[in-house]
Each structure stands twice: as C-alpha cells, then as structure tokens.
Image (cartoon, helix red, strand yellow):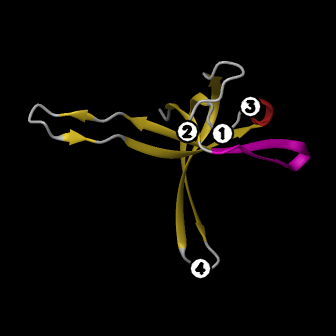
C-alpha cells in the first residue's frame, strides 16, 4: 500500500496550470515540522522541517486555485511518486512528489497561518 498523510503549511501560493482538454494541475510546496525536544541529559534536539512537493489534479486543483494561499495549513492524503529526468546539462535528476487524493483546509476562513 502506498499512502501518505501530511499536515503542514503552504510555503508559497500554488502554481496552477491547465493541460490537455483543460485538466487543471496544481503544484504546491508543503512544509511539515517535527518539533524539537530536550533529552534527559539536557541535549537540545532542534525542530526539523521537511518540504514536500504536492501535485493535485482536476477538481482538487481547482479548489486549490481558488482557496489555498501561502501560509494556509492543509491536511493532504495521497501517494508518493518518484520520478527522474535529465536537466539542461544532461545530468540525471530525481524528484519525490506527493500525488494528492484528498485535501482538507485546516486554516479557519479569513485567517492566514504564518509559514
């Protein structure tokens, strides 16, 4: 089973484009943070923030285009996908993306969460 669940903040306004027959595709960057803590011996473990590239298709992309902005808190459910491509210099590059199946907006209407 390939299932990913993320809760995080949108790092920048989503990029939305339309492909074949007007199908909407949205791409956004989502920051998830694991809070730091203090070990029993007093050692401080700092916060750790990871950035995820999330792709949303069709109706989900249209919702994102209308309602999602930088700083919003989202719950994303989807699948992880690994891709590779050759850059302009011919170097092989690898990318990890989350293909969203479900989206819930967690930021109350009218509020923008800090990133």
Disc 1, SS: loop
In the picture, the disc for residue 70 is 1
Give the image quarter of residue 75. top right
> Contact (CB < 8 A) between labels 2 and 3?
no
Of tags 4 and 2, which is closer to the observer? Answer: 2
Is 30 part of what is drawn in magenta?
no
Q: To which residue does mark 4 refer? A: 90
Q: Which of the two discs, 4 and 3, labels the residue nearer the N terminus?
A: 3
> Contact (CB < 8 A) between labels 2 and 1?
yes
Q: Which of the two discs, 2 and 1, labels the residue nearer the N terminus?
A: 1
Q: Residue furthest left?
A: 41
Of tags 3 and 1, which is closer to the observer? Answer: 1
- What whole-number distance in Å separates the C-alpha atoms at marks 1 and 4? 33 Å
Q: Residue at x 62, y 23 (%)?
A: 107
Left or right: where does residue 71 sit relative to residue 44?
right
Q: To which residue does mark 2 refer? A: 115
Q: To which residue does mark 3 refer? A: 60
Q: Which of the two discs, 3 and 1, labels the residue nearer the N terminus?
A: 3
The rendered magenta stretch, by its main secondary structure, is classed as strand
Q: Residue at x 59, y 79 (%)?
A: 90
- What whole-number distance in Å separates the C-alpha atoms at marks 4 and 3? 34 Å
Left or right: where does residue 8 sit relative to residue 25?
left
The magenta span reads 12-28
């Amino acid at each position: 089973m390939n299932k990913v669940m993320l809760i995080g903040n949108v790092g920048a306004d989503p990029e939305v484009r339309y492909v074949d027959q007007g199908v909407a595709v949205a791409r956004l960057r989502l920051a998830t943070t694991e809070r730091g803590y203090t070990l029993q011996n007093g050692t401080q473990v700092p916060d750790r923030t990871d950035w995820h590239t999330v792709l949303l298709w069709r109706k989900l992309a249209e919702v994102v285009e209308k309602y999602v902005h930088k700083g919003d808190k989202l719950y994303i459910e989807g699948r992880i996908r690994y891709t590779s491509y050759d850059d302009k210099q011919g170097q092989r590059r690898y990318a990890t993306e989350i293909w969203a199946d479900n989206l819930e907006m967690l930021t109350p209407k009218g509020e923008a969460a800090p990133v």
